[in-house]
Structures are given as structure tokens and as C-alpha cells.
């Protein structure tokens, strides 16, 4: 045994845990949870003792430095040095000490700078032995181990957290979280919050906004039990952006009234005295606990403040409100307690003002206050502190969302936020100096365990997971899986799970579940529905195989956190894609539409079955969490939501042939005289290997089809004779090596003996050997290039481009760093893209970028563009009227639902290779894709657009 190993559990004996009588109650309670963690792993519960009188060969000490006589004694005897911990913020040390005192051979000591530091150290030990922070909320059972031997690699001193206040907001909690907590805990009680606080602390968080739709944290404990419990654990409580002075929104309805000291109107102009009394009593009641005080005022239930007319009126009233609140805190509260102003929704206008009206930004009344910004509710940063603001003494916060209840469409179901998006946005936020508070809306919490774990780790240890770690999402996913399934999965299984999570969440995020409809993905154009169905089907197959084959003690966590949310999400995507195909085929008059109607019906039944199964899983542990509406929202919320429609086709009264290209809407039927013709020009351009033709019978019975004219050295068919009851695919494959040097056209005839449809297939071998590397070749006047497939990437002394993986709608992106830099035109890094077009003339260049927002007032999210040798231009990716985060602004609303900005530019290109050089300019811009379209061509209606073009 190595010199510094510590036997925590050996030969059926567990080292006792010392909790000194001087230790705080919160650490004592967490020690009990730690003892339970050890029992979960080994089946043995360690004894918790108050002193070291009863000697044992090995002992464990959990202690807070300033409370510990034993630490003082160990330091005096040179066994321990607490200097690196004492006086620090939320820091802990772990050390194995030999011969700490007479009668004990080894001591494992976890010592914290204060309560939270000690608690984080205790839970670090739990993770070390294989207990996940999601042991309760994620059903992550730890691996059974007969012995626990702690290696010396556990020793060390933790760092101070990167972000000072780190936490989450349980919000939009009905019907799921609300029903769950009433069923299992009798309401929003201290019994329930004990589980939430434990999760927060296991994730090394310290700050919580409690549920508030129909509950009051200060009253529902019952009484103040919630607040007392939070204070005991060292959890800092806050209130949401519209709940000032330690008062929950719901309290107002309880206490308001004409015959009360508070009055009846939530209107500062009309009821100033009543509101000040109301806030005063909130401060008197709750200031004895650790809080961050929300300041200011908004309207009732997240609405605009009433009683004012002009912008100046609003600013003046808000100044008076904050001034009076500060006086109340001075007199009745704790003036050392942090205060926070949320610059959210209309408060942002009051903060910045306009060209004629000075806002609150430079008002001295905010000098020591945390200024909390908010993204656009869909995960895209908006206003961030500029260089002038960054000197603000109170620091800055960020309110982020994994869940949102509001316009244009809510998203509150299972997770649809990729880690790549969180990393890209929150690293930007941190680099802008937002480091005082990070809080994320996690909705019902259940279903968002994975992104929440990442968010909290990023906030706690930005050095490890932040800007410097370009593979942060990938590395964290691997580490997270390793922790949930500690020591029980093969390398291949862990890799499969990582791919599943990454790809599944990316697919779910392509269109938020609630706003996905049958018409979003085009059922034919560019084959995007079939591509989506293939990806989803493969993912479902992997999900089912893993559920069947994973070790038994891994299945609960897998089902709870991975299988159920992803299987449900993929089923919903299938449902809407099937509905789109059903409508498409019905419009074409094909009876195969009826088969897709059945698939839609099956998907609806599967959605209900998955929810029901989840409600009964784990003996009903999560009953209630399955109740969220998530299908077919017709407006911003679930009112009027519905399942997709299903169309039925009545077959013709005899067999009849209908023919179409699989990637087009047009159908071709019997024609007297010359047969109708389908053009297949795809083989005139490099890259396409095959084209699919759908031969359908839209009548009863069976048709007997033949294909003639097939004598061609560069074509192959998957069949030339086929009996068709519903529909069969005729695949026309191209042997590109055998293509002629000059254009050649072959006419195939598809016939059932009555109907004849001609298929004209053209092909030609293009000379591409001399083209420069990474040149993308047009197909029928269109070139599509993904942002990371540049021909050349040019760094500048001032900055460089970085590649984003598994990001955005395109699956990749390019973003300039430093992320805080606004580059002068031509002075920033650039990326060069090459496109070969066969005709000179006018083209449209469509620049596709992430749905980012300008980070400064009046910003245009610019990039620079040079086409060939033309002058360099500055291009705005948003219009003059763009307003990020404003539901009434169609440009923003459409952009965030579609996950993309599109900027169309008119360009003149010459025949051959053309170069497009994109320069970084405004911070926040992320390039995803370029489309080049000849003027006589159009991008067909679709959601994803053309697949990327073939390139050298």
C-alpha cells in the first residue's frame, strides 16, 4: 500500500467521521449525507462522532477552519497548514495525515475556509468514490465497492470559484414541478427544498431563485422553515427579477387589501406608502438570513410597471423606488447584503435611456449594486457591459435560460440546449466581465440535469472549462458520463453515450419542440425530411440498444437522464416529419399518404406511452414531471396546441402509375401525346452519386412497371421490372468514372403499360483536377459551404477565428476571439472561401449566421466581406429596426425560432473559381454557412437549405 493511501472502508470496517461540537449545523447535516453516500457505495454507514476521544486506526475529519480546535492543534504540531484556505472564499483542502494524534494511524481531513467550502470538500469526496451530484435528481446509482481506498491524488487545495454567486431558478413550474412536489412533499416545503439545496451544493453552487408561480418561499416551509434550511446549509437565496426586497410575488395577493398597511394597488405612483411598508416588513422578516436583495420594481407577474407615461417618468419613478428601498435596507435590513438590479425587459430602456433622455446607467444610486443582464430568453447574449461600464464597483450578473415561458413560443419541455451554445455564449459573457452572478432558468429542473451540470461547472471553474478549453463541451460530456456510470461502462459504451447526447440534443435544438410543426422541414426539397428521419431513426435504435444492453445498475440513470428525454424528443420529431410526409403525399394524390398517417398516429400513441411509463418509473418517483404540454403550439403558450393533422387519400378505382422525383413536389401522370418528362441534371455536376424516383400506385390493386432505355455505360438502376402496390423507389446511380467528356442525355421510360413517364438523365465529367484545394463546385447554379470549410484562415495580431463544433443549425460555426473585440474593417481575422461557378453574372450571396444579438446599443452585428478583387465592405447581419429579445420584432422572432440570421447580398461573379473573404468585425457574430445562388435560380423552400456542395 502506498504511503499516503487512506482506507476509508476496509474488511467491513468504515473509518468514523469526526464532526466537532463547535461545527455548524449545516456541515453536520451534510456529513450525514456523506455517510449515506458511503453507505450507497459499500453498504456500510460510518459512525459520526463529535471528538477524537474514541480512537480508531483511520479517522475522517470534516471541519471548518475557523470553528476547529483540532485544526488549530494539527497546525501547531506541523501536521497541517491551513494558510492557503483560511480567509478565502469557498475554498477547501483535502489531506491525508499520518499519526495525527496518539492512537490513530491516518486521518483524512477535509477543511474549508467557511461553511460552503467545507461542504464542497465533503461532496468532492463523494464524487471521488463514485457518487454523482445527480444521485437523487438523476437516479444515478453509484457502483458497489466492497472497499474504499483513497489514493493520495485526492490531496490538494481547491481554487476560489470563478463566479462569485452561482445558481439556478426553478421556474415555469406548473404543471410538472408543482404537481410533483405536491404529490411527494406536500407542496413547496422544506422537505422538497432539502433535495434542491443538496443538488445545488453538490454542483458547487451557492445561490437559488425559488419557484414562485404559486408559492412563496418565505411562507411555504411551512412558515420560515425553507429560509432557515437554506441558511443552515449556506445557500444564498434571491428572488426573481420582479420580486423586490425579499418578497415573493405571491405574497402580495395574500397580504394586499384596502384595510391593510399595504394598500391594494401594485402601483408605486398611487400606493407608495403601502408598498414601502410591504417591502419594509419583507426586509425585517428575511434579512436575518443570507440573501441577495432584488431591487427596483416591475409590474405584477412579470409585466410592465404601471402609473407612468413617458420614459423620463419611468426613470424618475425607478430612481425614487431604489432610493427609498436603500433607505429601508439601511434601517431595517442588512446593509452588507448584496443588492441586485435586473436589467430585464423594459428596465433596460430605463437603464440606458435614449438620445433625448439619460437613463440610470451613470446614476450614483447604483454604484455598489450588482447589475444583472439577461440574454434574449433564447440563449443569445444581448447587452453586455462595455469598457466604460466594466469599472462598475458592484459587478455584473447574467440571467440565462434553458427554459422560457413567453413569446414568440415557449420552450419548457425536456432539454434542447446544446453545451456548445452554452460554452459559446457564457464564455463571451465572462470575458465581458460578468463574474459576480450567474443564474440559469432550469424550469422544472428534471430534464435539464445535463446542461445544468455544465453551467455550474463552467461558473465554478472557468479556468478548466471556459475560454481556454476549446473542446470544453466534448470533454465535459465525456467526464459527465464517466461520473454518472462510474467504472461500469466500456470505452465504446461511453463514446456511444457521448455521441447520443451531443447529436440528440443538437437535433432537438434544430427547432424547439413546442414550435416544431409538420411544415417546418420540407418533405421533399433537398431530401431534408428523409435525412432527418434517417438521423432520428439511427439515434432511436442506439437508444433502445443501450437500454437493453447496459449493465443493470446503470439503467436507472440512463433511463432517467438520457433515454426518456431523448427518446421522447426523437419521437416528437418523427411525429411532425411523418405528418409533413403525409400531407406531401396526400397533395400528390398518393395512397402511401395513408401509411404516413398511421405512423403519425403511432407516434402520438408513443408520446403518451412514454410519458405514462415515466410517471410510473421508480415507483412513481417523478410522477407529475411528465405533464408538460409540448406538441404543436399555435401561439406563445399551450393554449390551442394540437397534434398534427392527418390526411387520408381514397385510392383510384383501378391501378394507376404516378411518378415523381423524391426531392421535388411535382407529380407526373399519364399524358396523351408526348409523355410527361422528369429532368435529372444532377450528374452534370460532381458529387451526386444517385437520384431517387418514386414510382407510386395511387389506385387499388397492383401495377407492373418496367423501365426501358437503360443501355448506358454510366448509369445503373436498382430495378427494371417491379410490381408496385403502393410505392417503390427507383434509384438511378451514376458511375462517375465512366461519364463522357461532353454532355450526354439518356432517356429512360417508366411505364405500367398504360402510363408512360420519360426520365431524361444528363451527365458529363467535369475537369476538376486543377482546381485549388477546398474549392466548392456549383450544382445547378447553387453552391453551399459550411463555415469551418474555409480554404484559408488568416490570423491577425489583434485576433483569430476559432471553430465551433456541434454548433448551431449548420452543426458548426466560426467566431473571432478575443470575443470582446470589435475589429475595424479589414483589421480583424478573415476566412477565405472558394466557389466554382459555370456562368459569369449576377448571383445572390446568402450569409448564414447564428441568431446572435448586437452587444452594444445600436449595434448592427457587422462582418466584413470582400468578393474576389472587389472593395472590402462592412455588412450588417441585422437590419436597422432589429430589436433582440422583443417578441413584437418579427426579424428577431423568426430568427430565434429558425436559429439563424440570413443576410442576402448581390454579387457579380466570373466563370470559374471565385473567392469570398469574410472578416470578423463586431463581437458576437458567428458565421455558419455561405450560399451562392445564380440569379436565374432560387433556393427552394426548406428549413435546412441545400446540403453542402462537393469540393476538391
Image (cartoon, helix red, strand yellow):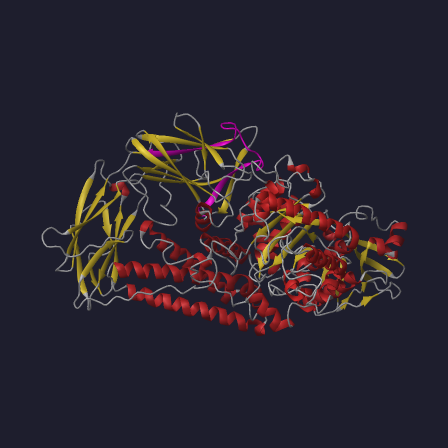
The image position of residue 209, as x and y in percent, is 65, 57
The image position of residue 464, as x and y in percent, is 64, 45
- Answer whether residue 492 is magenta in the image: no
The image quarter in which residue 917 lies: top left
Q: Residue at image x 57%, y 34%?
A: 821
Count up the numbered dots.
0
Q: Nearer the viewer, residue 571 or 167?
A: 167
Q: Residue furthest left?
A: 673
The image quarter in which residue 729 lies: bottom left
The image position of residue 903, as x and y in percent, is 41, 39
Relative to 841, say whether 430 is above or below: below
The N terminus - image quarter: bottom right
Please indicate, yes or no, whether residue 729 appears anywhere in the rendered image: yes
227 displayed left or right of 703:
right
Q: Residue at image x 59%, y 40%?
A: 353
User: Magenta region: which residues?
Assistant: 809-836
The C terminus - image quarter: top left
Q: Nearer the viewer, residue 246 or 375?
A: 246
Relative to 496, say whether 798 is above or below: above
- Answer whether residue 829 is magenta in the image: yes
Please indicate, yes or no, whether residue 113 appears anywhere in the rendered image: no
Q: Nearer the viewer, residue 48 or 271?
A: 271
694 displayed left or right of 64:
left
Relative to 258, say whether 334 is above or below: above
The image position of residue 373, as x and y in percent, is 61, 46
Amino acid at each position: 500500500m502506498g504511503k499516503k493511501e487512506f482506507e476509508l472502508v476496509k474488511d467491513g470496517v468504515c473509518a468514523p467521521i469526526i464532526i466537532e461540537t463547535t461545527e455548524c449545523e449545516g456541515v453536520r447535516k451534510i456529513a450525514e449525507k456523506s455517510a449515506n453516500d458511503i453507505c450507497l457505495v459499500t453498504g456500510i454507514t460510518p459512525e459520526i462522532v463529535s471528538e477524537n476521544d474514541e480512537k480508531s486506526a483511520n479517522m475522517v475529519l470534516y471541519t471548518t477552519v475557523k470553528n476547529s480546535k483540532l485544526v488549530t492543534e494539527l497546525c501547531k504540531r506541523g501536521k497541517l497548514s491551513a494558510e492557503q484556505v483560511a480567509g478565502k472564499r469557498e475554498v477547501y483542502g483535502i489531506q491525508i495525515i499520518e499519526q495525527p494524534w496518539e492512537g490513530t494511524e491516518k486521518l483524512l481531513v477535509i477543511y474549508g475556509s467557511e461553511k460552503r467550502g467545507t461542504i464542497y470538500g465533503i461532496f468532492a469526496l463523494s464524487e471521488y468514490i463514485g457518487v454523482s451530484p445527480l444521485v437523487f435528481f438523476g437516479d444515478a446509482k453509484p457502483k458497489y465497492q466492497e472497499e474504499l481506498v483513497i489514493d493520495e491524488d485526492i490531496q490538494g487545495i481547491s481554487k476560489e470559484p470563478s463566479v462569485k454567486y452561482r445558481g439556478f431558478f426553478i421556474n415555469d413550474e406548473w404543471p410538472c414541478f408543482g404537481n410533483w412536489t405536491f404529490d411527494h412533499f406536500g407542496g413547496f416545503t422544506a422537505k422538497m427544498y432539502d433535495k434542491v439545496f443538496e443538488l445545488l451544493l453538490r454542483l458547487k453552487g451557492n445561490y437559488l431563485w425559488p419557484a414562485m408561480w404559486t408559492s412563496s418561499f418565505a411562507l411555504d416551509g411551512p412558515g420560515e422553515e425553507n429560509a432557515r434550511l437554506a441558511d443552515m446549509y449556506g445557500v444564498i437565496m434571491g428572488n426573481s427579477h420582479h420580486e423586490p426586497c425579499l418578497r415573493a410575488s405571491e405574497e402580495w395577493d395574500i397580504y394586499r387589501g384596502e384595510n391593510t398597511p399595504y394598500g391594494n394597488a401594485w402601483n408605486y405612483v398611487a400606493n407608495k406608502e403601502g408598498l414601502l411598508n410591504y417591502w419594509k416588513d419583507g426586509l425585517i422578516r428575511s434579512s436575518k438570513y443570507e440573501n441577495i436583495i432584488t431591487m427596483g420594481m416591475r409590474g405584477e407577474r412579470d409585466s410592465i410597471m404601471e402609473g407612468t407615461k413617458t420614459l423620463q417618468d419611468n426613470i424618475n419613478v425607478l430612481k425614487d423606488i431604489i432610493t427609498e428601498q436603500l433607505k429601508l435596507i439601511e434601517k431595517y435590513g442588512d446593509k452588507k447584503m448584496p443588492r441586485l438590479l435586473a436589467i430585464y425587459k423594459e428596465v433596460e430602456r430605463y437603464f440606458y435611456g435614449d438620445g433625448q433622455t439619460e437613463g440610470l446607467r451613470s446614476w450614483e444610486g447604483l454604484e455598489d449594486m450588482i447589475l444583472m443582464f439577461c440574454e434574449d430568453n433564447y440563449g443569445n447574449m444581448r447587452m453586455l457591459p462595455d469598457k466604460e461600464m466594466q469599472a462598475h464597483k458592484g459587478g455584473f450578473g447574467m440571467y440565462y435560460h434553458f427554459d422560457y415561458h413567453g413569446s414568440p413560443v415557449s420552450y419548457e419541455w425536456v432539454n434542447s440546449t446544446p453545451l456548445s451554445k452554452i460554452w459559446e455564449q457564457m464564455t463571451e459573457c465572462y470575458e465581458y466581465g460578468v463574474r459576480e452572478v450567474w443564474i440559469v432558468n432550469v424550469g422544472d429542473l428534471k430534464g435539464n440535469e445535463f446542461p445544468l451540470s455544465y453551467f455550474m461547472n463552467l461558473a465554478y471553474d472557468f479556468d478548466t472549462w471556459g475560454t481556454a478549453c476549446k473542446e470544453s463541451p466534448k470533454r465535459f460530456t465525456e467526464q459527465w458520463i464517466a461520473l454518472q456510470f462510474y467504472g461500469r461502462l466500456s470505452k465504446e459504451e461511453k463514446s456511444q453515450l457521448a455521441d447520443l447526447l451531443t447529436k440528440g440534443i443538437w437535433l432537438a435544438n434544430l427547432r424547439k419542440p413546442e414550435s416544431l410543426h409538420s411544415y417546418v422541414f420540407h418533405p421533399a426539397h433537398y431530401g431534408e425530411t428523409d435525412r432527418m428521419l434517417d438521423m432520428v431513426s439511427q439515434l432511436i435504435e442506439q437508444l433502445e440498444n443501450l437500454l437493453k444492453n447496459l449493465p443493470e445498475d446503470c439503467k436507472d440513470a440512463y433511463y432517467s437522464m438520457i433515454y426518456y428525454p431523448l427518446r421522447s424528443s426523437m419521437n416528437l420529431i418523427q411525429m411532425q416529419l411523418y405528418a409533413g410526409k403525409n400531407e406531401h403525399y396526400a397533395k400528390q394524390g398518393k395512397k402511401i399518404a395513408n401509411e404516413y398517417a398511421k405512423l403519425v398516429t403511432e407516434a402520438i400513441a408513443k408520446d403518451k406511452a412514454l410519458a405514462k411509463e415515466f410517471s410510473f418509473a421508480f415507483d412513481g418517483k417523478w410522477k407529475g414531471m411528465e405533464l408538460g404540454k409540448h406538441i404543436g403550439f399555435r401561439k406563445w403558450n399551450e393554449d390551442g396546441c394540437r397534434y398534427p393533422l392527418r390526411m387520408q387519400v381514397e385510392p383510384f378505382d383501378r391501378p394507376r402509375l404516378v411518378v415523381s422525383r423524391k426531392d421535388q413536389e411535382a407529380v407526373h401522370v399519364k399524358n396523351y401525346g408526348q409523355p410527361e418528362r422528369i429532368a435529372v441534371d444532377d450528374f452534370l455536376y460532381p458529387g451526386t452519386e444517385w437520384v431517387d424516383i418514386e414510382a407510386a400506385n395511387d389506385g387499388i390493386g397492383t401495377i407492373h412497371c418496367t423501365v426501358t432505355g437503360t443501355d448506358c455505360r454510366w448509369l445503373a438502376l436498382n430495378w427494371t421490372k417491379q410490381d408496385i402496390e403502393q410505392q417503390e423507389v427507383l434509384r438511378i446511380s451514376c458511375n462517375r468514372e465512366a461519364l463522357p467528356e461532353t454532355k450526354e442525355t439518356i432517356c429512360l421510360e417508366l411505364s405500367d403499360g398504360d402510363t408512360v413517364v420519360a426520365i431524361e438523365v444528363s451527365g458529363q465529367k467535369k475537369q476538376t483536377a486543377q482546381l485549388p484545394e477546398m474549392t466548392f463546385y456549383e450544382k445547378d447554379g447553387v453552391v453551399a459551404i459550411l463555415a469551418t470549410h474555409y480554404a484559408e484562415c488568416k490570423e491577425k495580431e489583434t485576433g483569430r477565428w476559432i471553430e465551433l463544433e456541434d454548433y448551431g443549425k449548420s452543426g458548426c460555426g466560426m467566431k473571432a476571439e478575443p470575443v470582446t473585440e470589435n475589429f475595424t474593417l479589414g483589421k480583424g481575422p478573415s476566412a477565405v472561401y472558394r466557389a466554382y461557378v459555370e456562368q459569369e453574372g449576377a448571383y445572390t450571396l446568402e450569409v448564414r449566421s447564428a441568431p446572435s444579438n448586437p452587444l452594444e446599443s445600436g449595434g448592427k452585428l457587422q462582418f466584413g466581406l470582400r468578393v474576389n478583387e472587389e472593395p472590402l465592405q462592412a455588412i450588417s447581419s441585422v437590419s436597422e429596426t432589429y430589436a433582440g429579445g422583443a417578441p413584437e420584432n418579427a426579424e428577431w422572432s423568426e430568427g430565434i425560432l429558425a436559429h439563424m440570421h440570413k443576410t442576402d447580398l448581390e454579387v457579380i461573379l466570373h466563370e470559374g473559381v471565385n473567392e469570398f473573404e469574410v472578416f470578423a468585425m463586431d463581437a458576437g457574430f458567428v458565421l455558419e454557412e455561405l450560399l451562392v445562388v445564380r440569379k436565374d435560380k432560387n433556393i427552394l423552400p426548406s428549413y435546412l437549405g441545400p446540403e453542402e456542395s462537393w469540393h476538391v
